[in-house]
Image (cartoon, rainbow, N blue to C red):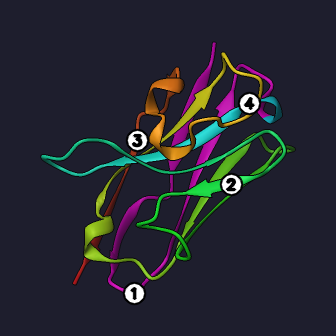
Amino acid sequence: QVQLVESGGGSVQAGGSLRLSCTASGYTFSRYCMGWFRQAPGKEREGVGTIDSVGDTVYADSVQGRFTISKDNTKNTLYLQMNTLKPEDSAMYYCAADLMGDGSCYGGPHAEHEYNHWGQGTQVTVSS
């Protein structure tokens, strides 16, 4: 049974940092494309960034240079390091996996439809 469990969310002031984690189980973590997405109240879910099986990353323009995605295959864990946080980064953050693909993230953070397994989310709130 595939499970993705996010953690690390919380409240922080603008300019601060948070690191989110996503612990995976039930599949071979290292082989697949994974992504981070977020959804703010009243808005559509949007892609934050992706990481493929070999560790190459792609980011949405809105977070480029501030957020970093990494993974530890020995711990089956995906990370999202968020620096210089802004109030507009406040959202529920989700990790997702594309377990039907070959490990490449063809569509990047804009291809939400490619992801077939999702975590339950962790809330990030950034105050001004």
Foreground mark, 4 or 1? Answer: 4
Q: Earlier in the sequence, mark 2 or mark 4?
A: 4
**Is residue 69 rendered to the left or right of residue 124?**
right
Q: Residues within 10 Å of mark 2 (few under 14, many from 20)?
A: some
Q: Disc 2 to disc 3, how far (Cα)? A: 21 Å
- Do the numbered discs 2 and 4 sit on residues whose CB atoms are within 8 Å? no
**Is residue 107 rendered to the left or right of residue 63?**
right
Magenta span of residues: 1-29
- Residue annotated with mark 4: 32
- Residue annotated with mark 1: 15
Q: Earlier in the sequence, mark 1 or mark 3?
A: 1
Q: Amino acid at mark 4?
A: Tyr
Foreground mark, 2 or 3? Answer: 2
As drawn, the label of residue 30 is none
Tell me the element at label 1: loop
Q: Disc 3 to disc 4, how far (Cα)? A: 19 Å
Is 126 or 114 nearer to us in this picture?
Answer: 114
**Is residue 100 rendered to the left or right of residue 11?**
right
Is 60 or 42 nearer to us in this picture?
Answer: 60
Q: Residues within 10 Å of mark 4 (few under 14, many from 20)?
A: many
Look at 16% across and 49% down and name the residue there: 41
Residue 24 in the magenta stretch? The answer is yes
Q: Amino acid at mark 3?
A: Gly
Foreground mark, 1 or 3? Answer: 1
Q: Disc 2 to disc 1, how far (Cα)? A: 23 Å
- Residue annotated with mark 3: 121
Vertical placement of residue 59 versus 17, above or below: above
- Residue annotated with mark 2: 57
Look at 67% across and 48% down and name the residue there: 78
- Do the numbered discs 3 and 4 sit on residues whose CB atoms are within 8 Å? no
